[in-house]
Image (cartoon, helix red, strand yellow):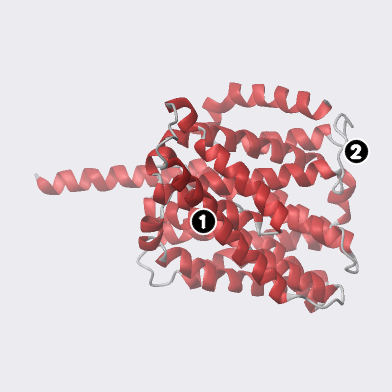
Amino acid sequence: MGLLVAFAVVLVIAVGISSIAKRTIVSTTVLFLVAGFVLGDGMTDIVHLTPDDALVNTISEVALFTVLFTDGQQIGVRQLRHAWRLPGRALLLGLPLTLGITAVLGIWLLGLDWASALLVAAVLAPTDPVFASAIVGREEIPQRTRSLLNVESGLNDGLALPLVLVFLAVAAGEHAEVGVLAVELLLGVVLGVAVPVAVRLLFALPFFRATPLYATLTPVAVGLLTFGLAQVLDANLYLAAFACGITIASIAPQTRDAFREFGELVSEVVKLLAILVFGTLISPSLLADVGVLGYVFAVLLLVLARPLAVEIALARSGLDRWERLTAAWFGPKGFASVLYGLLVLGSGVPDAERLFHVIVVAVVLSIIAHSSTDVPIADAFARRAARDSERARASGR
């Protein structure tokens, strides 16, 4: 009950400052993060949550599934096919490069062995769709850049998960069942496609007729069914969510359009709740445990690892310099990394608690940095577009 009341109070404040936040570097995301920190253990102790609390795992899973499900509906198969070239570069080249650079930084700065360094790198390599949505939703940013970040962040959480599990098994000295992981990923995609297709075929039967109100709820039913079946069948939950969203956009665009406003609202609420919960997990003792080199590692992760990897991956891609820099900068780490970090914490990996603390600090700095720079960067693109438009009009005279 304390968590519910706390979330409601912070939500009221966030609504009240949302107009200011939209125009300035004031971020509602950071507001919920700081509120969670203040309300959590070690500060006011109003909300008591621990990383091994079942509620934390449930909220994180629901938040990621919801955001991936709604993000997937932003683009259908036809659009994805046309927009795949840039995300493909970021995923197939940028993600491995980010992982490699991060692992080297972990060995150099934190003194980790190769297995632990690769594990931390795999946890922190993917971008998070929950926080990437802050820039993806800015219409001032060029569409191809937003599409790149949207598709990349939607897919790389699921693609990074098998790497996390493999490196986790290696670091713990266990045998990694690669075949089982591959089946989970494939099953997630299959499930995400099959459920909406089956529902679509069912609704084609002559005795199935939905009112406009209930037709809007169709994606909700499909999403819940996909979520439940993925849990029962041990399929990859996040790939199932994204594949399901893309399938709905591809085979039922009118249903997608009717659901869009409601889906975005639900996604935002769940995202903010997840951020508040994450904030409660951050205690002063955790922040102090990381040490100076841990903070240096987190900063270099933001300003070196991701930017360098993406710049290399997007070289000669057709994006101009500012678009490449934007894509390289907005590689936010978020609740997905925390969720994977919880797997590390509960494992038999040596020094698991320290690794989790490093992961948390990297995520915190990422949330603050990326949530505070989306508005200035979007404004810069808007000013550039206005200048280009003015020049075009002048040259046409």
Q: Residue at 58% across / 34% down in the picture?
A: 266
Q: Residue at 70% across / 40% down in the picture?
A: 275
Residue where numbered disc 1 is placed? 193
Image quarter (top left, top right, bottom left or bottom right) of the N terminus:
top right
Q: Position of residue 83 (x, y in %)?
A: 39, 60
Where disc 1 sits, the SS reads: helix
Do we see residue 347 in this rendering? yes
Q: Is residue 104 left or right of residue 85?
A: right
Q: Is residue 128 above or below residue 86?
A: above
Q: Disc 2 to disc 1, how far (Cα)? A: 45 Å
Q: Residue furthest left?
A: 397
Q: Earlier in the sequence, mark 2 or mark 1?
A: 2
Mark 1 surroundings within 10 Å by alpha-carbon count, few (fewer than 14), some (14 through 19), many (20 or more): many
Question: Tag 1: residue type?
Answer: Val
Question: Tag 2: residue type?
Answer: Gly
Q: Is residue 390 above or below residue 231?
A: above
Mark 2 surroundings within 10 Å by alpha-carbon count, few (fewer than 14), some (14 through 19), many (20 or more): some
Residue where numbered disc 2 is placed? 42
Eye-nearest disc, 2 or 1: 1
Judging depth in this view, the residue of 62 and 151 nearest the camera is: 62
